[in-house]
Image: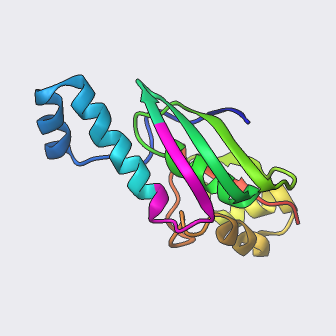
Amino acid sequence: MGLFSFSKSSGAKLVDKKAEEKAAAVSAEELKRVKTEAMMKAVDNLHLPVKDVSILLNDDVVTVYGEAETQVAKELVLLTLGNNAGISSVDDRMSVVKPEPEATFYEVKSGDSLSKIAKEVYGDAKKYNAIFEANKPMLKDPDLIYPGQMLRIPTL
């Protein structure tokens, strides 16, 4: 548990511009509701072994509650929530049924690739697939990473 920092200026947009403008025109609370629903949908789409997930959005901070079966599932939820434009941190209030050592998080820099990160972290660029696999289903292609994105770096 703790507070995890993210790059507020990078990441996927939670909602498209048109939906954001429509919700904002109604009220700040409606915009918050729309963004929260989008984050819940993103977590649900991962099909991870988590239950009782709830999300509170307060400006650029997301607080997440719930229970994850594994540490990996918990970390993927945190990364899914934090890797969104406009989110600066995720306050982790999730519990884990089967505690395991936490993975390291790595912030992607301009010019990075998974093989470059693997070379830096493991000393072997060919181990990039371990990073890719550790970040699935959040990552769908090993070549599609962006500066500011946070990734799980598993211990080998």
Left or right of 31: which side holds 54?
right
At 43% from the left and 31% from the top, the residue drawn is 57
Q: Residue at x 17, y 44 (%)?
A: 19
Point out the image quarter for the C terminus: bottom right
Left or right of 117 on screen, residue 22: left
The magenta span reads 43-55
Please state the horizontal and vertical placement of residue 129, each as a whole percent of the image.
70, 74
Residue drawn at (28%, 47%) of the image: 15
The answer to whether residue 111 is seen in the rendering is: no
Residue extending furthest toward the front: 52
From the viewer's side, name the closer residue of 114 and 131. Answer: 131
In depth, the one of 6 and 55 nearer the eye is 55
The answer to which quarter of the image holds residue 28 is: top left
| Quarter holding residue 26 | top left
Residue occupying image coordinates x 22% and y 32% = 30
Looking at the image, which is closer to me, 145 or 73? 73
Colouring of the image: rainbow
Q: Does the stretch in magenta take in 15?
A: no
Q: How many marks?
A: 0
Position above or below: 132 against 109: below
Quarter containing the N terminus: top right
Residue 16: image location, x then y, percent:
23, 48
Residue 85 x %, y %:
40, 40
Does residue 36 show up?
yes
